[in-house]
Each structure stands twice: as structure tokens, then as C-alpha cells.
Image: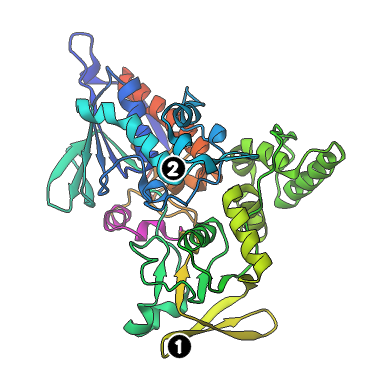
Amino acid sequence: MLKIRMSSPRLQAQTTRPASRVVIIGGGYTGAIIAKLLVERGLRDIEEVTVFEPREQLGCGLAYDVENIDVRLNVAAHRMRAIPGSPAAFLDWLQTSGTLTVDPEAVTPEGIFARRSDFGRFMQEQLAPHLDSGAIRHLRQTVRSVDRQNEHWRVTDSSGTAISADILIIATGHPPLSRPPVIDNLDPLTASRIADVFAPNVFDGIGKSDPILIVGSGLTALDALSRLDALGHNGEITLLSRSGLMPRPHAGGGFSPFGDFRSAELTSARKLLAKVRATIADAETQGIPWQSVFDALRQHAQEIWQGLPMPERQKFLRRLRRWYDVHRYRMPPQAALTLEKGLNMGRVTVERGELVSITRDGKDLLAWIETRNSGSELRCRRILLATGPEFRDYADHQRFLLGMHRDGFIQSAPLGLGLSCDTGGRALSIAGTPNATLFVAGPPARPAFGELTGVPEIANQAARMVDQIIGCCARETRTIIVSPSV
């Protein structure tokens, strides 16, 4: 690989350097916080910030654009460090906006666990001044295609309108939920009884006593359980997953993170597991809950991931990923109470197995569940899909991503976590070279970071990326990377 450093003709002292135009595809939390930081930090270097987001509001995305007021954040407000430079911004907003007055249930012994929709409102208020001034332009369109034209990115939306950009940022968030293969071959009438929990009006028409099968046992499944409880549902609910594991509860007491995971010796999944177990044992002798150990682990999770060789990353994903997820992504206390109540009453059960067939029997569905040693038949009225997002072959999920993959600009990462990029967020082409004008932000960038789902981690990546982009725009020299032909 050959690197050539050269003066930029447009940055000569005799001329005024033109500012850069940035396009962000995706206006959920990731795209919104990047847009906000760009206009606030790049006053001289950024001319225009355009965000493509078909939803009415920026900053909400799928996670926080919810009408159900009973669905809550799984992180306490004081840990939602959403605004770089203002770590307490969300907590302060909750306390000054009157939100806690109308939502007293948000306050728990474990902290303030606000409604997801309230975090969406908070982000809308953060963006409002920049949208009103025109500093951020929100286009309510989906992107149809992206290509290169005259050394610029050309982004064409679903209406056929095209705009140019010097910098392009892919912030498309989580892909659709994974679907059990058995669902793909069902007849339309049977399939109409099965829906993603994120689908519009998905809870409409569910009878209060209808038995429900929820496929999945993570936070999304608990959101569905909370919604059914708020609607007065009193029928039987079965949570089904391959592992049977569920998110763990939060700990009260305000403990600080415990443990040091900065060691360079954590170069294998086995060593990492041993270190976590030893640290938890040490914490227990001091009366410190295991949750504090995982809070410390989270602070260094990206460094650990980047220090693991590829085979060890594969081993972690295959053997430890689900175990890590249920301890790392813990359930809000309100959901924990709903789950505990349902389990104690015998109304909620958790099954470990795989959904292998679905047939219709009058008004009911018969779901065959295959377990490790046997199988069983479950009768229900509706099936709700609450599985995790399908990150494998990420470039296949949207038309414009497919086109960019075909043209060699991006590639799906081999471990099935998103799009290939470097630790600066620069997208890697099919040839493996980073593109200085094309970035991947938020969850799709997980291959380079491992831990990039929570708001604090995304906020940190956004801040570093914005500073890098502004630095490149202001630089008086450019580095051109020439990949040798094979």
C-alpha cells in the first residue's frame, strides 16, 4: 500500500477554503448526535449537514420512537451519557422538564429508569434549535442508491432527488429482527397471526385471555411482556429461546464499577472468562454485587475486543456472547417486577428450545418446540417475534447498501456483526482499504468495536468521528492511499 501526502490545491493561502457537505443516512440516536456535534463543533468547516430519515422526528429511531409509555430504558438515567461534554444532560432534563412528575414510577431504588419515549423527546429537543435554524436539514425519505460522481458522493432518495456530499456517514442502526426459518413457508392466514413486536399496532386484537408465544427472551421480549401487562392481559405467556437465558436484574446501592480489565494478558476468551469469574469472587468477599464487575468490564470492552485475535473473537461469539449479553444488558426494575409477578402466578413460563413448525387449528396456532432431548406442542392465539436483530450480511438489508457493496465501497464483516470498518469508523472497501470520506457509525460498526450498542459507547464514537471529520476538512494536506493491484 502506497501513501502519498500532498498539498490540497483548494487550501492555498490565497483562496478561501470551502466548507464540506455531510450526508448522514439514518436519523436515530446515532445519526442525530453526529449531526448535532457536526454543526456545533464544525462551524467553520462544515457547510451543510443533511440527514435522511423517513420518520417524522430525528433522534428517536426504532428504539425510542415508541408510543407505548410502559416500555422503559434498561439503563438508569445517570448512566445515559448521551451528550458528549454534558454527561448529566438527560438526568437534568428529566428533573427540570416535569417528566418525573407525570411518571413517578420511573424512580426506583436502583435509579431512575425513564420511558423510552421520553428519551426520544429529549433528543428531539436537542435537535430542535439546529433544525429550526436550518443548520441540520432533515429529509423524510429513504435512500435508494449511493454512487460516486466527480469525486463526491451522490445520494439519491426514493423520490429520485439526488444530492452531493463530501462526507457520507452510514448510521442505519439495527437491522430487522431475525426470523425463525419455519415462518417463511407459512400460508398467509397462519402468517397473519405472527408479527414482530415492533410492527405497528401489533398488540391490537389480542384478547385479554389469549395465550401468547413470544419468540425470544431478551430485553425486546420483556418490552412485549410489559406492554401486555399494561394492557391488562391475563392469559398465559411463554417466552421461548434457544438458550433459555434472560437478562439479569440491576443492583441497588449505588456501587461503583469494580475490577481492572486493562491487562494486556486478556488475549483469549478463556482468559477473559477466568478474569471475570475471579473478579466477581473478589467483589463478593467485599459485599460488592457482580453488576459492578460488569460495569467495569463494559468500560474496557472495546479495548479487550480489539486485542482479541480473530479466532478468539469467534470463540467469544460462539460460547460466551449470550452469557455476556444477559449480564451486560440488564432489565429495568419495572420489567423485573412484571416478570417476577408472572412467574410467581404461573402465568409466564420460560422455555428453552427451537420453534420448528407452526400449524393452524381453528382460532389457535399449534407451535411445535424442539428441545435438546425431546419436543412439545404449544397451543396459542398469537406469536410475537422478539428475537435479536439479524446483523449477518448487513449489506443485504437495504437496497442502497447492496448497491454500495456491489460497487466495492463497503463489505459485510465476516463475523456477522455489521459492516467492516477501522477503529476510526472509516468504511473498508472490498479491497480492505479505508475510505477517508465514508464512515460507519453506531451498531453497524460493531465489528471494529465489539461493544457499540449502548448510548454512552455510541456517543463516544460519534464525538471521536466528528473530531476526525472536522480535522480532515480543516487539514491543509491530504493523504491519498493507493492500493496496489493484484
- Viewer can see residue 6: no
- Which of the marked residues, 1 or 2, is nearer the chain's N terminus? 1
Q: Quadrant of residue 301?
A: top right
- Identify residue for label 2: 442
Query: What residue sits 30% from the left and 25% below the top?
Result: 39
Q: Mark 1 points at which residue?
A: 359
Which of the two residues, 364 or 389, is positioned nearer the viewer here? 364
In the image, is residue 389 part of the stretch drawn in magenta? no
Which percent across, then down, holds residue 360? 43, 88
Q: Is residue 392 magenta?
A: yes
Res 49 visible: yes
Magenta residues? 391-406
Residue extending furthest toward the bottom: 361
- Hey, which quadrant is residue 203 in on the image? bottom left
Instruction: Determine whether, in the image, residue 332 is placed left or right of residue 383.
Output: right
Query: SS class of the residue under badge 1?
Result: strand
Secondary structure, mark 2, is loop
**Amino acid at pointer 1:** Thr
